[in-house]
Amino acid sequence: MIRIGVLVSGSGSNLQSIMDACECGEVDGRVSIVVSNVEDAYALVRARSKGIPTRVVSHTDYPDRETFDRELVRILRESGVDLVALAGFMRVLTPSFLRQFPGRVMNIHPALLPSFPGLHVRQKAIDYGVKFSGCTVHFVDEGVDTGPIIIQAVVPVYPDDSEEELKDRILRLEHRIYPRAIQLFAQNRLTVDGRRVLIRDLRKDRDACLTNPPLDS
Ligand code: GRF
C-alpha cells in the first residue's frame, strides 16, 4: 500500500476522487498528508472530514521558491510519502524539489497535452475550435505541463460550449483517470522510457475510435 501526499490550492475535487478511490480499494494506497499553499482551500475541508492530516504552507511566507519547496519536502518526507500527487496545486515546483522525489510526482492537467499547457485551457480549446479536448495525467518534470504522459481521456468540444460546461465535462473524467494512474503506479506497472511511459500488462483496444461529429450524423 503506497502513501500518497497530495498538494492542493483549491476546491480539491480531484483530491476527493483519490481519497474515495483509496477508501473503496480502487487504489492500493492511502492519502497520508494533504498540503495546501492556500489557507482557505476547500480541499482542506475535504481532507479533514476524512481524518487525513493537513498542513498549510503559504508561499507568501517564504522569501523564494527554494525555501518554500524545502518546507514542502520536509513535510512530505516526515509523512513518508511514496508518491506526490499535484491536484490543482497552483505553484511550479523547483528542480530541487523534483530531485527529492524522482519519478514520483504526478500532475493532472485539464487538456490533451501537449496541446494547451498552462492556464485557462478550456477557453483556449473552445476558442481554437478543437473538436476534442480532455485531460492528462503526467509525471512532473522541470517544465510546465511537459512531463511524460501516463493516461489521457478525451471529451468532445462543441462550438456553443461555455467554459463552465467544458470544465465540468472534463472534470468528471479527471476524477476517473487520476485514481487510475495512481493505481498503475501503486501496482508498479509504470516505467518511464525517455518521453514515453510504458505500462505493464496493458489491454489494447486497437479499434478504439471517436469522431466528433459522429460519422453517421
Ligand atoms: C483541475 O481541473 C485540474 O486538472 C487542474 O486544476 C483543477 C483542480 O480542480 N490541475 P480540483 O481542485 O481538483 O477540484
Image (cartoon, rainbow, N blue to C red):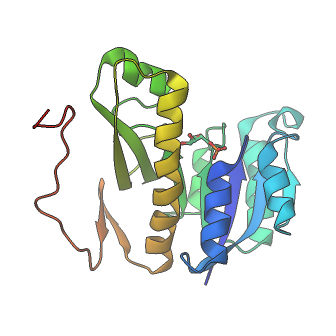
Considering the image in quadrants, where does the C terminus appear?
top left
Q: Is residue 177 above or below residue 20?
A: above
User: In the image, is 117 to the left or to the right of 1?
Assistant: left
In the rendered image, the residue lying farthest to the front is 217
What is the quadrant of residue 154 in the picture? top left
Ligand 1 visible in quadrant: top right
Q: Is residue 127 visible?
A: yes
Q: Residue at x 42, y 44 (%)?
A: 135
Using the image, determine if residue 79 lies above or below residue 17: below
Residue 129 rendering spot, x and y as whole percentages: 30, 19
In the rendered image, the residue lying farthest to the top is 127
Could you say which quadrant of the image residue 146 lies in? top left
Q: Position of residue 128 (x, y in %)?
A: 33, 17
Front residue of 127 and 117 = 127
Give the quarter of the figure containing the N terminus: bottom right
Left or right: 205 as drawn, with respect to 84:
left
Q: Quadrant of residue 21?
A: bottom right
* Image coordinates for residue 33, horizontal then vertical, percent: 77, 65
Residue shown at the point (20%, 31%) measured from the top left: 213
Residue located 55% across and 27% down the image: 164
Total numbered badges shown on the rendered structure: 0
Residue shown at the point (29%, 57%) measured from the top left: 194
154, 63: nearer the viewer: 154
Q: Position of residue 78 (x, y in %)?
A: 80, 70
- Near-viewer residue (214 or 210): 214
In the image, 157 versus 11, the foreground residue is 157
Q: Is residue 142 visible?
A: no
